[in-house]
Amino acid sequence: MLFLCCITISVAQIVAVKKDSNGKYGFVDSSDNWIVQPQYDFAYWNEKSEFGEIKMYDDKKCGAVDKNGKIIVNRIYNKIDIYHKEGIIVTLQTPDYKSFDGVIRSDGKTILPCDYFRLKFTYSDPVLIEATNKEGKCGIYSLEGKEIVPCEYEYISIKRHGIEVENSVGYRGVYGKDGKLLLNVEYAEFPISPVGRYNLLNKGGNMKDNGYGNFTYSNGGKWGTCDSLYQITIPCEYDGISDYAWEDLIAVNKGGITNTKGTVGGKWGFWGDGREIIPCQYDEVSNFQNGVATVKLNGTVQLIKNPLKDGSQIQIAESSSPLNKKERGPVVSRYPAPDSDVDKDIPTAKKQAENSFAFIICNENYPDAPVPYSLNDGRMFKEYCQKALGLPEKNINFYEDATFGNIITAVEKMKQVADAYDGDASIIFYYAGHGFPDDKQQSAYLLPIDGNASDITTTGYSLAKFYKELAAMKLKSAVVFLDACFSGAKREDQMLAQSRGVAIKVKSDVPEGKMVVFSAAQGDETAHQMEEKHHGLFTYFLLKELQATGGDVDMGTLTEYVTKQVKRQSVVINNKKQTPTVIPSQALTNTWQTLKLR
């Protein structure tokens, strides 16, 4: 009988460097047997790349061996850098001490000769070699020595889906990792990483050195976009373009001028679904949110719906200017005029607050659910701003029965004030009227006089959006007073008519920037009126404390007094709980209580 047996012979491999009694270095295996005899003045073993570096001091030349002890890089180089298992960067020095790099693959084959000022394996894709030639131009090679990107560029950046390049005049383009040109090198601007879901492109813009050796566009050219795979999604045909896509629509501009500060002039429209879906006809536009965007045409502010959701562009609200007495006459209240103790003997500040601005909105005459005494509240708060707080009349912006367009106008005026005063202005925002919730998102909205509670996300003004816009302004401080609640009662208009609010618990939006928000009620509570005083309960005690202190009061004292009085009187008068709430931004967490209104 014949028996067969298999014998496995293991080949010893280098695992460490060892020094002999003569001070020479070699390499040993795991059993401490010599794989490479001790003969070198220096030796180094790289476990990760499995290469060993060898060197002699007499001629200062380096070489390399593989894990089996075979010499794969002859000892003729001045320097070697072992990066990974695929290859080795080697360096030769000329008699005039100039150094040039080359690449030798792990099998000993020379991939690139020592003709390059600098070579390196890329961190993002180690099978690619980034090269800088003797003229200082950059390119990319593969481990087989194939030219992926020719060495003719000033700047190269390897990304997930392509290789971005920049030429000597600052124009950029993109190569695929197979060497195919994805975007011609003719674009003045696109970011290193996508903005939103797309890259901005600028074609033909004037280039300017930013002083650090990099180019940025200065002005001109045409704008478009590409996706993360560098496929053109909007052709470079526009004079301006927004830097973010909202609800799959991107604002585009024709006829304007775009520079590093933004786009001025021209007409705006929207691109979506592969085409200019809303023509460039508007003077100003905002991004779409909750299916609508605000636009301005010939001085008229309006809302348009997202055509990708509704199938057509629909105007649903408009206003040409703020509500004021000169243009539309005074708004008439159906309730008794203010005649309580806080409406008389208003103290007067000795000094005017020239850098403080008030924006007051009081909405009372809703078609189906009026808010009792809201006009009284707003009108008297305006008096206190002018007298007790010392705000010049020109600094007070007053809106009675404000429409959606009026609210937009107020916010835009705030932005103008913030820009003009460059961080040296303070804003007081006061709102009395209906708040309303989006029951799906549990988010809060201010309800304009022309709004519809059944379509609040379209016709209401998002409180979260307002906080975000206010936080983005460069201000010294911002104080927000809200005599409204943001509950809801399943469309029961009778409840709306009986109280200031309407019963779903909404999320509390946290303000940012330098902002303090003081609201009349919390959660699903209702903000009530004080019938005998002809004011809202919250506003009455707010005015009461301003009257008692002459307006010289800090927010800590003011909120403590108002909260205590409202909680007590709401139970006594209305037999219901109402708890005013203070929410400071993170930046003012430790200092808001010392903040003063003047």
Image (cartoon, rainbow, N blue to C red):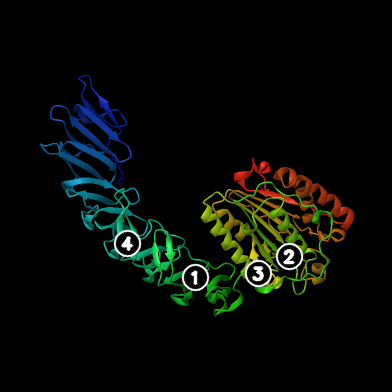
| The disc label shown at residue 249, or none | 1
Nearer to us in this view, 180 or 339:
339
Q: Which mark is residue 72?
A: none
Front residue (pair 477, 487): 477
- Marks 4 and 3, how far apart in space? 45 Å
| Mark toward the viewer: 3 or 2 | 3
Q: Which residue is mark 4?
A: 188
Residue 597: x, y in percent? 67, 48
What mark, if any, has residue 323 been given in the picture?
3
Give how far apart the Cα atoms at labels 4 and 1 are.
Answer: 23 Å
Q: Secondary structure at mark 2?
A: loop
Query: Tag 3's secondary structure?
Result: loop
- Going from N to C along the chain, the mark reached first, 2 or 4, is 4
| Mark whose residue sits in front, 4 or 1 | 4
Q: Position of residue 414 (x, y in %)?
A: 58, 59
2 or 1: mark nearer the eye: 2
In the figure, is residue 276 to the left or right of 20? right
Residue type for callout 2: His
Q: Are the residues flagged by discs 3 and 1 in contact, CB closer than 8 Å?
A: no
Q: In this rendering, does residue 228 appear at all?
A: no
State the residue position of label 2.
434
Gap between marks 2 and 4 measured at Cα: 49 Å
Amino acid type, residue under disc 1 in the picture? Leu
Disc 3/disc 2 C-alpha distance (Å): 18 Å
Which of marks 3 and 4 precedes in the sequence? Answer: 4
Instruction: In the rendered view, tell whether residue 465 sits above or below residue 126.
Output: below
Task: Classify mark 3: residues with Cα within 10 Å, few (<14), some (14-19) or many (20+).
Answer: many
Q: Earlier in the sequence, mark 3 or mark 1?
A: 1
Relative to residue 77, is residue 563 depicted above or below?
below
Relative side of 377 to 286, left or right: right
Point out residue 27 in the picture as x, y percentages from the top left corner. 25, 31
